[in-house]
Image (spheres, rainbow, N blue to C red):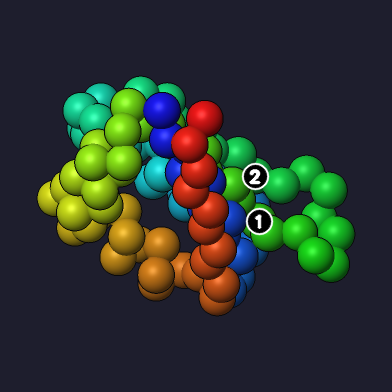
Amino acid sequence: MVTHIVLFKLSDPTPENLSTTRDKLLSMRGNIAQLRHLEAGIDIIRSERSYDIALITKFDSLQDLQAYQVHPYHAGEVVPHMKSVCSSIASVDYEC
């Protein structure tokens, strides 16, 4: 299994923008067959080093993660939204 974690720092982290962006990430549920686990949450600590939203996804294989990256819903709906609202994005992928 492969875990894919992405951290997002929004350009304008208002409560409305945070909620809308988290909901956009969660909208992948049921739209991308390769997803085995999906969670997204808004940071509650709000420290100087905090990112605003975390996405945690899991896949059966590296090939499934790669298929997710180019999936039309992810690449055509989610990625453009995230790029339009984020000032910084960081990720890590690992086998679990």
Q: Nearer the viewer, residue 84 or 72?
A: 72
The location of residue 29, given as percent across then percent down, is 32, 29
What's the mark number on residue 60?
none
Q: Nearer the viewer, residue 10 or 57?
A: 57
Where is 80 relative to 36, above or below?
A: below
| Residue with the mark numbered 2 | 42
The location of residue 94, given as percent across then percent down, is 50, 43
**Dots 1, 2 in contact, CB < 8 A:** yes
Residue drawn 20% across and 28% down? 33
29 to the left or right of 93:
left
Which element carries disc 2, helix, strand or loop? strand
Q: How far apart are marks 1 and 2 (CA)?
A: 6 Å
Q: In which quarter of the image is the N terminus?
A: top left
| Residue with the mark numbered 1 | 52
Q: Is residue 51 visible?
A: yes
Where is 44 relative to 88, above or below?
A: above
Q: Quadrant of residue 41?
A: top right
Q: What's the residue type where badge 1 is placed?
A: Asp
The location of residue 64, given as percent across then percent down, is 25, 37
